[in-house]
C-alpha cells in the first residue's frame, strides 16, 4: 500500500491511496463472506454460497463499499498519526476505483485545523466599564424575597386591581368561531405578570367578583398561529375569584423561612456576599469579553469556508429547534427577514464562534492547559445542580451523546483559558455603571 500526500489550499490535504491486488483481493473475499452470511441464497447455508452468487445477490457495489469500510479506518489512522495531522472532520472519500485484478485506488481529502497565529494574550491592557451594585441592592433583594414568600388572601369586598391574581373561566371567538384551545375554566391569571395577548389582563381590572363580561383584543401580527395573526377576538369571561398578594414582612421570621437564618441581619449578610460575588463575576465577564474581542481582531486565522458552512448549518438547526419550542414559525421568519440577511448574520456569528474556539484551543496548547478528571467531575456536579438531577444521569447522557461530551470538554477548557486571560490582564475600570 502506498499513500501520496498533497497539501492543498484552505487547510486541506489530498490523499492518493493505492492498495495492491493481493491485499485488496483478500479484503474483497472477506467482504463477500461477511455479506454472504447476511443473505439467504437458495440452496446454500448462510456464508457457504460461492463468491459469484454472493456478488449476484448482494451486489458488487455493496461488496466494494464493505471493503472500503474495512480498509480505510486503519489507512487514515496511520496516515494521520505518522504525519501528525490535526484534523477537524472525518476524512472525505472523493472517489475510488477497483481494477480488474481488484487492486484499488482511492482519493480522499482531510480537513486540517487552521493555523492560529496569536498576538499578545497575556498582560493585555483593557478598559472596562465597571459594574457596581446600587446602594439599595440589599433592600431590593429583600423585597424580592418578601414577594416570593407572600401569601394570597381571598378578596370579596372590592373589585380586582392590577396586582391581584384572578380565577377566571374564558372562552374565545374569532369571526364567530370558537378559538381552538382558546378556552379554560378556573384559570389562575396573575394580572401584574400576564403573558396573555396585550390588553387581555388589563380588561380584567376593576371587575366585580362573580361578574360575567366580554372583552375584545387583537392578536399580534407575529402570533405563532397564522390563522389568528392580526385578528380581532372576543373573549367571554367569568370572574370566579380574586386573590390579593400580601407581602411577607421583612423580619427575622422571613430570614428563617428563606434558609433558616437566625435573624434578619444574617440574611442581609448572606445577600451582601451574594451580590458582591455577582458583581465580581459580572466584571470578570466584561473583562473576558474585551479580551476576546481584541484577540479575535488581532489573531491571524485562515478559516476554510467548509468549516464555517458546517457551523452555520448547525446554528440553523439550533435556531429552528428553539423557535419551534417557542411556538414560532421558522420558515415564516426566514421569509420575513430574508434568507440572505439571516445567512449573513449566522455566518458572522459562526465565524466568531470558530475563531474563539480555535484561539482557546491554541492558548491551551501553548500554556499546557489540560482537562483533568476532577474538572469533569466538578462539571458533572454543576450540571446536575443546574438541571435538578443526579450526576449519574448526566454521565449517562454523556455516554449516549458524543456531542455532549465534546461540548462539556470545550466549556471546561474555555473556563480555564478565560481564567488565565483575566488573571493576567491589566484592567482599567472606567465610567462606573449600574445594572438596571
Image: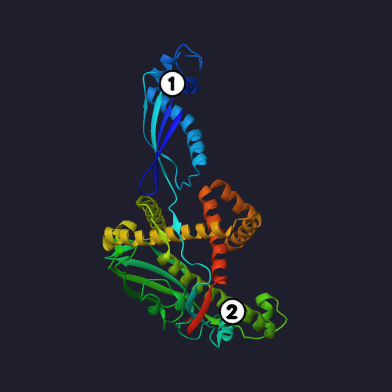
Q: Is residue 390 left or right of residue 431?
A: right
Q: Which mark's residue is nearer the viewer, 1 or 2?
A: 1
Disc number placed over residue 21 in the picture, else none: 1
The quadrant where residue 294 appears:
bottom left
The quadrant where residue 373 appears:
bottom right
Tell me, yes or no, if residue 284 can be seen here.
yes
Residue under the image location 28 percent in, 62 percent down: 341
**Residue annotated with mark 2:** 275
Q: Is residue 435 left or right of residue 327?
A: right
The percent position of residue 211, horizontal first and vertical second, equals 42, 78
Residue under the image location 51 percent in, 17 percent down: 47
- Crowding near pointer 2: few (<14 within 10 Å), some, many (20+)? some
Q: Nearer the viewer, residue 351 or 404?
A: 351
Tell me, yes or no, if residue 149 can be seen here.
no
- Crowding near pointer 1: few (<14 within 10 Å), some, many (20+)? some
The percent position of residue 70, horizontal first and vertical second, equals 49, 29
Amino acid at each position: 500500500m502506498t499513500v501520496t500526500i498533497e497539501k492543498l489550499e484552505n487547510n486541506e490535504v489530498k490523499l492518493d491511496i493505492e492498495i495492491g491486488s493481493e491485499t485488496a483481493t483478500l479484503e474483497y473475499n472477506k467482504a463477500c463472506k461477511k455479506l454472504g452470511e447476511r443473505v439467504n441464497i437458495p440452496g446454500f447455508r448462510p456464508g457457504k454460497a460461492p463468491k459469484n452468487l454472493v456478488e449476484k445477490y448482494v451486489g458488487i457495489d455493496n461488496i466494494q463499499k464493505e471493503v472500503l469500510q474495512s480498509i480505510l479506518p486503519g489507512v487514515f489512522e496511520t496516515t494521520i498519526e505518522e504525519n501528525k495531522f490535526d484534523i477537524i472532520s472525518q476524512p472525505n472519500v472523493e472517489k475510488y476505483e477497483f481494477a480488474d485484478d481488484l487492486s484499488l485506488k482511492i482519493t480522499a481529502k482531510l480537513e486540517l485545523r487552521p493555523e492560529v497565529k496569536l498576538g499578545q494574550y497575556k498582560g493585555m491592557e483593557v478598559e472596562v466599564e465597571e459594574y457596581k451594585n446600587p446602594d439599595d441592592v440589599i433592600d431590593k433583594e429583600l423585597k424580592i424575597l418578601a414577594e416570593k414568600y407572600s401569601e394570597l388572601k381571598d378578596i370579596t369586598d372590592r373589585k380586582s386591581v392590577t396586582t391581584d391574581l384572578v380565577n377566571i373561566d374564558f372562552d374565545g371567538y374569532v369571526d364567530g368561531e370558537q378559538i381552538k384551545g382558546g378556552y379554560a375554566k378556573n384559570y389562575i391569571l396573575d394580572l401584574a405578570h400576564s403573558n396573555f395577548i396585550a390588553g387581555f389582563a388589563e380588561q380584567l381590572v376593576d371587575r366585580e367578583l362573580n361578574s360575567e363580561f366580554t372583552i375584545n383584543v387583537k392578536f399580534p401580527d407575529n402570533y405563532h398561529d397564522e390563522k389568528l395573526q392580526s385578528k380581532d377576538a372576543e373573549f367571554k369571561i367569568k370572574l370566579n375569584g380574586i386573590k390579593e398578594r400580601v407581602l411577607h414582612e421583612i423580619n427575622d421570621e422571613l430570614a428563617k423561612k428563606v434558609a433558616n437564618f437566625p435573624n434578619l441581619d444574617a440574611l442581609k449578610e448572606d445577600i451582601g456576599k451574594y451580590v458582591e460575588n455577582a458583581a465580581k463575576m459580572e466584571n470578570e465577564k466584561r473583562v473576558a469579553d474585551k479580551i476576546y474581542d481584541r484577540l479575535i481582531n488581532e489573531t491571524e486565522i485562515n478559516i476554510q469556508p467548509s468549516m464555517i458552512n458546517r457551523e452555520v448549518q448547525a446554528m440553523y438547526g439550533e435556531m429552528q429547534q428553539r423557535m419551534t419550542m417557542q411556538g414560532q414559525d421558522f420558515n415564516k421568519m426566514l421569509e420575513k427577514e430574508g434568507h440572505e440577511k439571516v445567512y449573513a448574520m449566522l455566518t458572522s456569528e459562526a465565524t466568531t464562534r470558530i475563531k474563539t474556539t480555535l484561539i482557546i484551543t491554541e492558548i491551551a496548547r501553548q500554556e499546557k492547559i489540560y482537562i483533568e478528571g476532577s474538572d469533569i467531575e466538578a462539571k458533572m456536579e454543576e450540571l446536575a445542580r443546574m438541571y435538578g438531577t443526579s450526576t449519574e444521569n448526566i454521565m449517562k447522557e454523556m455516554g449516549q451523546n458524543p456531542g455532549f461530551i465534546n461540548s462539556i470538554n470545550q466549556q471546561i477548557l474555555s473556563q480555564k483559558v478565560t481564567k488565565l486571560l483575566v488573571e493576567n490582564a491589566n484592567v482599567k475600570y472606567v465610567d462606573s455603571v449600574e445594572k438596571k
